[in-house]
Image (cartoon, rainbow, N blue to C red):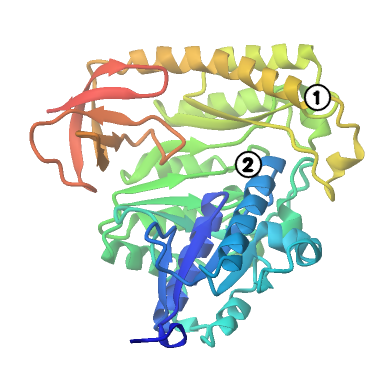
Amino acid sequence: MKTKTLKKDKVNIITLGCSKNMVDSEVLSGQLQANDIDVVHENKKSDHNIVVVNTCGFIDKAKEESINTILDQVELKRKGKLDKVYVTGCLSERYKNNLEAEIPEVDAYFGTMELPLILKQFEADYKTELVGERLLATPQHYAYMKISEGCNRTCSFCAIPLMRGGHVSKPIEELVKEAEGLVKKGVKEVMLIAQELTYYGLDLYKKRMLPDLLNRLADVKGLEWIRLHYAYPSKFPLEILDVMCQRENICNYLDMPLQHAANNMLKAMKRQITREEMEELTSAIREKVPGICLRTTLIAGFPGETLDDIEELKTFLLKQRFDRVGIFTYSHEEGTSGYELNDDVPLEEKERRAQEIMEVQQEISYELNQDKVGKVFRTLIDKKEAGRYLGRTEFDSVEVDNEVVIHSPKRLPIGEFVNVRITKAYDYDLEGEVV
């Protein structure tokens, strides 16, 4: 009988936080696998003996979840169910010294840019020839693609530059090669992610190069959908929209976090844009790309925010009628310039304001969805669940947007496109039948 010491290591990677963290976990998995180390994401079988927790340190709730996850894994190690626990990611980057002091049972902590050091723990080499290669944690037909790292913006609420550093673009050739590799694996949709998409290329090419990158990616055969996430509104390069109109496989979809609409809040948040400029921008975007899906993210409860500011934000939403809206409650993050302000809105009130704003958006979303009834949309089938299929249109990103519920007696292949006529619409989801 084999003893425990002879059993081959199996690594489980637990990913918390955003899609950028997901990509980092996929890259780590790819490197471990290339070094002949058994690796899985979010292992349900519990037949692993090593865990890597990829943490998030963005806001209080995310930090709490990360710490609880680390403690859970340390407890499993204490019970003899794990041999090693490693921690990486944003929380580890930001609070490494504190974590080492408070949770010393973790075998090693690593920052966001220390992949080679993590590999050393497994006596594995960082294989440079694998640049762009990943072991996907998503279903086979879609993937996130990180086009840059870090951020040069100075938004007063955001701790990302503290954890990810300044903006660093990946070269176009490297990204095209990565996209080609993903397509070979069966990927049909890539979601371009960065802390700030529109800044892409300024560091490498001395000018904004996102339109050029989009054209090159749109040429990749087999890539059916290219989706844009996290565009910054100030000095937004409208030529991106020209490419969107010209290339069929670039989704008419833009995720552009605005954070607020009251000018005093935008100024305090250091957003470098006014409400009036945002309104002009959204009008210009809709004029250039009729029918575009606009998604935005907002913050409730920033220091100094008044009920009048909330009313202004609600009025803005009613006027702009965004297709999708997400909202965070403000988190007072040390190291940011916002931390110097008095965090004067109680948590309960922050949550009440966020709920009030989302109730306005819920009505808008319901009305916009009702307009889709009777129309036919090309839909990507994501999965089958409880006897029904779940898919998305080009106007819906993974996890954060609408799903299309499809009841079909015929088998629908996962990862394939079908045409669906919408028969019912709800606040955030649609129902339809294949035509």
Of the residues under marks 1 and 2, which one precedes in the sequence?
Answer: 2
Depicted 153 relative to depicted 83: above or below: above
Whether residue 134 is visible: no
Q: Amino acid at mark 1?
A: Pro
Depicted 372 relative to depicted 131: above or below: above
User: Disc number at residue 385?
Assistant: none
Residue 56 spot, x, y in % from top left: 63, 52
The quarter of the displayed image where residue 83 is located:
bottom right
Q: Nearer the viewer, residue 293 or 207?
A: 293
User: Disc number at residue 346?
Assistant: 1
The quarter of the displayed image where residue 73 is located:
bottom right
Residue 251 spot, x, y in % from top left: 37, 40
Residue 322 spot, x, y in % from top left: 51, 23
- Asked if labels 2 and 1 touch by Cβ distance under 8 angstroms, the answer is no
Query: Local crowd at mark 1 within 10 Å, few (<14), some, or many (≥20)?
Result: few
Residue 319 spot, x, y in % from top left: 57, 13
Q: Amino acid at mark 2?
A: Tyr
The residue under the point 12% across, 28% down is 435
**Residue holding disc 2:** 232
